[in-house]
Image: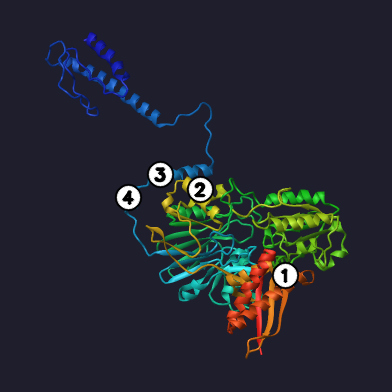
């Protein structure tokens, strides 16, 4: 008995050592295989004979042998579980393992969830009432932001902004969206919701409201700025302005719009959560994530997370800074730079140019001026309007006696003054440009001026800004601009902040908005890198109809869309033909041919007289003008001899012959305007 137990216990470690294999069943002293435990798989095949003996074990030997078998099996099972757990755990390097950042952890979790692609969830998707997203501006361009959200017999607008004209839009003041689709579907329109008060989001609103009297919804400062624009267009009291607060919801027919607080370069900016029958759409508006904002109220990230947990159908995310890695710096960093520069300019007059709508920036200028005992004057119509409205609504805190009128600045020494002005983009009629050119009524730039341009040039404005900087320096002023100091931070989200919003909302579909194609494409790539299927992303364009019913996401058609040019009081009366003529006149000038013809005989009674404007100076090109006169006379004579009496035909022949002659002589093609009088 003792020898049998010894042999049995000696076999137990052998069973434990076999990893990844089934353990050999324990045997009794007579060589008969014992019955395998219920948890262990029975070995295949028939029992093998050992020592040629098939007799059953004695009853007295059975219990110790079974105990030894259970011990060996338990040891083997424990060893196998440990090995399995070890294989499942990632290999860790020696020392403390580096923990991922919160954004990286959320991004990884989102990738894992999207990679799983649960089939049951896909099978349970139900088609619902479709919702349409139609961009009338803001795609493949900067500015002119305007988006239609349409579902069944209801629709509303998100923003109604303007854009500034391109270089080839000669004489054009601003550019606004085409409202044709709205006009055709005015019965469906329930209102306009505004994300914030920048010109590229509210600038076209007065032109829109002049045609369509619909309710407008926005935060307090946003509508305060809108009200100022309505006064300029004599629309005050004719439009219903409805003030809303973050987390408040507005009903739009079968849809509802929830306002979500975000950080931006202007207070009271909001994203929008649109609750539709098909699902929730989130429109981020312009935003960034600022953990130390001037208004002490950071972006409402918890609400984005709550909506993401419930399920977001579509994310429309701004893309302005989608090319920039990292995160946008806090606005407070600009205040630190102001503090340093104010110390350097203790005995100088300080002139700061910035965006009029950047109330946070203006507040930090006020704070720095108060700290260093200086008075503040405001210059520029838009700057005066915004500062006045922001003080009225409580968004600017200005100590009593700090502000002085720009007309009274001569009463103060240079070291006592700070002038806040417009013109950070080198606009030709802005206050700073007029100062640089010596045309400003109250401000004359001197070598004792310390000028800070607290903005980066918008793409396309680099030459304008450079010209202003050069002129200011010629006058002896010290100019701080662009990246010499940290005097400007963006109000738009960079890549890390965009990833954070994607991670929180976890949308099924994605459509990048607000930016040129390169910005939209980069934002789409970012979504793909985070695990989204590219089939669920659409890079749209103005006029295209994007539709989703909760299952599909596709472009289903187009609507009229484009740019309407505003020139003075004229809206839309400047089109491609007018711009073509203006460009032609600007490049090659004008030739006017005046002649008088006898109606009875068709002969030339007077002229032809040739007038040049913008082509050549007549007194210095008399020979050329005389030859041109002969060409016209010859053409008119050929018309008379050939019996050509139709004015249109005569004008065309004069135009063709004179144009051919002038091009051969000068290689220029001026606009030729024949004027024929008949007596």
Q: Name the residue under label 4.
A: 120
Q: Is mark 2 on a helix, strand or loop?
A: helix
Query: What's the CA distance linking mark 3 and mark 4?
Result: 14 Å
Q: In this view, does 544 lie to the left or right of 69?
A: right
Among the two numbered marks 1 and 3 on one chain, the one whose residue lies closer to the N terminus: 3
| Mark 3: secondary structure | helix
Q: Which of marks 3 and 2 is in front?
A: 2
Which of 436 and 260 lies nearest the eye of the viewer? Answer: 436
Q: Which of marks 4 and 1 is nearer the N terminus?
A: 4
**Residue at 19% across, 12% down:** 29
Labelled pair 1, 3 in contact (Cβ < 8 Å):
no
Among the two numbered marks 1 and 2 on one chain, the one whose residue lies closer to the N terminus: 2
Q: Are marks 4 and 1 in contact (CB under 8 Å)?
A: no
Q: How far is mark 2 from mark 4, CA to CA?
A: 27 Å
Residue assigned mark 2:
526
Quarter occupied by residue 598 = bottom right
221, 457: nearer the viewer: 457
In terms of sequence position, does the residue under pointer 3 or pointer 4 come before the other? 3
Nearest the camera: 189 or 653? 653
Q: What element carries label 4?
A: helix
Which residue is disc 3 drawn over?
115
Quadrant of the image containing the C terminus: bottom right
Q: Which of marks 1 and 3 is in front?
A: 1
Direction front: furthest residue: 641
Q: Residue 614 carries which label?
A: 1
Rounded to the nearest angstrom, the CA distance separating label 1 from label 2 is 51 Å
The furthest residue to the top? 3
For the residues bearing labels 3 and 4, Cβ distance under 8 angstroms: no
Q: Alpha carbon of mark 1 to alpha carbon of mark 3: how far?
A: 66 Å
């Amino acid at each position: 008995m003792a020898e049998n137990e010894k042999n049995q216990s000696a076999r137990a470690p052998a069973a434990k050592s076999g990893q990844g294999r089934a353990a050999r069943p324990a045997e009794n002293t007579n060589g008969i295989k014992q019955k395998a435990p219920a948890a262990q798989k029975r070995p295949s095949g028939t029992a093998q004979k050992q020592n040629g003996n098939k007799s059953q074990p004695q009853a007295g030997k059975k219990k110790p042998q079974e105990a030894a078998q259970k011990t060996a099996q338990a040891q083997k099972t424990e060893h196998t579980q440990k090995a399995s757990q070890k294989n499942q755990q990632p290999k860790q390097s020696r020392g403390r393992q580096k923990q991922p950042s919160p954004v990286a952890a959320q991004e990884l979790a989102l990738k894992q969830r999207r990679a799983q692609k649960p089939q049951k969830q896909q099978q349970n998707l139900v088609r619902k009432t479709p919702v349409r997203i139609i961009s009338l501006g803001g795609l493949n361009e900067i500015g002119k932001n305007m988006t239609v959200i349409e579902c069944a017999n209801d629709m509303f607008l998100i923003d109604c902004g303007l854009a500034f004209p391109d270089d080839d839009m000669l004489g054009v003041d601003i550019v606004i969206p085409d409202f044709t689709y709205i006009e055709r579907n005015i019965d469906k329109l329930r209102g306009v919701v505004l994300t914030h008060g920048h010109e590229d989001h509210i600038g076209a609103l007065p032109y829109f409201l002049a045609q369509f009297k619909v309710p407008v919804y926005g935060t307090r400062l946003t509508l305060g700025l809108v009200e100022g624009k309505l006064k300029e267009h004599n629309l005050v009291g004719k439009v219903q302005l409805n003030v809303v607060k973050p987390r408040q919801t507005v009903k739009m027919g079968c849809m509802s719009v929830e306002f979500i607080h975000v950080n931006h370069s202007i207070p009271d900016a909001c994203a929008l959560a649109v609750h539709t029958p098909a699902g929730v759409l989130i429109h981020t508006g312009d935003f960034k994530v600022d953990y130390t904002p001037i208004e002490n109220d950071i972006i409402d990230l918890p609400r984005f997370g709550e909506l993401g947990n419930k399920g977001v159908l579509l994310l429309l995310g701004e893309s302005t800074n989608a090319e920039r890695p990292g995160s946008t710096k806090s606005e407070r960093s600009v205040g630190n730079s102001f503090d340093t520069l104010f110390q350097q300019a203790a005995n100088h007059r300080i002139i700061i140019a910035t965006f009029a709508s950047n109330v946070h920036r203006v507040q930090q200028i006020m704070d720095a001026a108060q700290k260093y005992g200086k008075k503040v004057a405001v210059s520029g119509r838009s700057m005066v309007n915004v500062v006045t409205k922001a003080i009225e609504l409580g968004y600017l805190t200005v100590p009593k006696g700090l502000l002085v009128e720009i007309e009274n600045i001569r009463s103060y020494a240079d070291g006592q003054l700070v002038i806040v002005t417009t013109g950070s983009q080198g606009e030709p009629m802005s206050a700073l440009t007029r100062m640089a050119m010596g045309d400003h009524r109250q401000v004359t730039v001197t070598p004792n001026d310390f000028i800070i341009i607290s903005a980066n040039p918008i793409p396309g404005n680099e030459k304008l800004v450079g010209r202003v900087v050069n002129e200011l320096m010629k006058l002896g002023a010290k100019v701080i601009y662009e990246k010499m100091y940290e005097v400007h931070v963006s109000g738009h989200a960079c890549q890390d902040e965009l990833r954070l919003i994607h991670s929180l909302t976890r949308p099924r579909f994605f459509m990048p908005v607000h930016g040129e194609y390169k910005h939209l494409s980069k934002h789409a790539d970012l979504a793909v890198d985070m695990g989204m299927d590219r089939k669920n992303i659409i890079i749209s364009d103005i006029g295209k109809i994007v539709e989703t019913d909760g299952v599909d996401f596709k472009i289903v058609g187009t609507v009229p869309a484009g740019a309407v040019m505003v020139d003075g009081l004229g809206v839309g009366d400047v089109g491609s033909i007018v711009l073509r003529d203006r460009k032609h006149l600007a490049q090659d000038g004008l030739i006017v041919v005046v002649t008088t013809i006898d109606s009875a005989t068709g002969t030339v009674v007077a002229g032809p007289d040739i007038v040049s404007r913008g082509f050549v100076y007549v007194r210095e090109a008399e020979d050329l003008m005389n030859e041109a006169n002969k060409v016209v006379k010859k053409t008119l004579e050929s018309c008379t001899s050939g019996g050509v009496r139709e004015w249109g035909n005569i004008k065309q022949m004069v135009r063709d012959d004179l144009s051919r002659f002038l091009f051969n002589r000068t290689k220029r093609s001026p606009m030729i305007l024949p004027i024929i009088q008949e007596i």
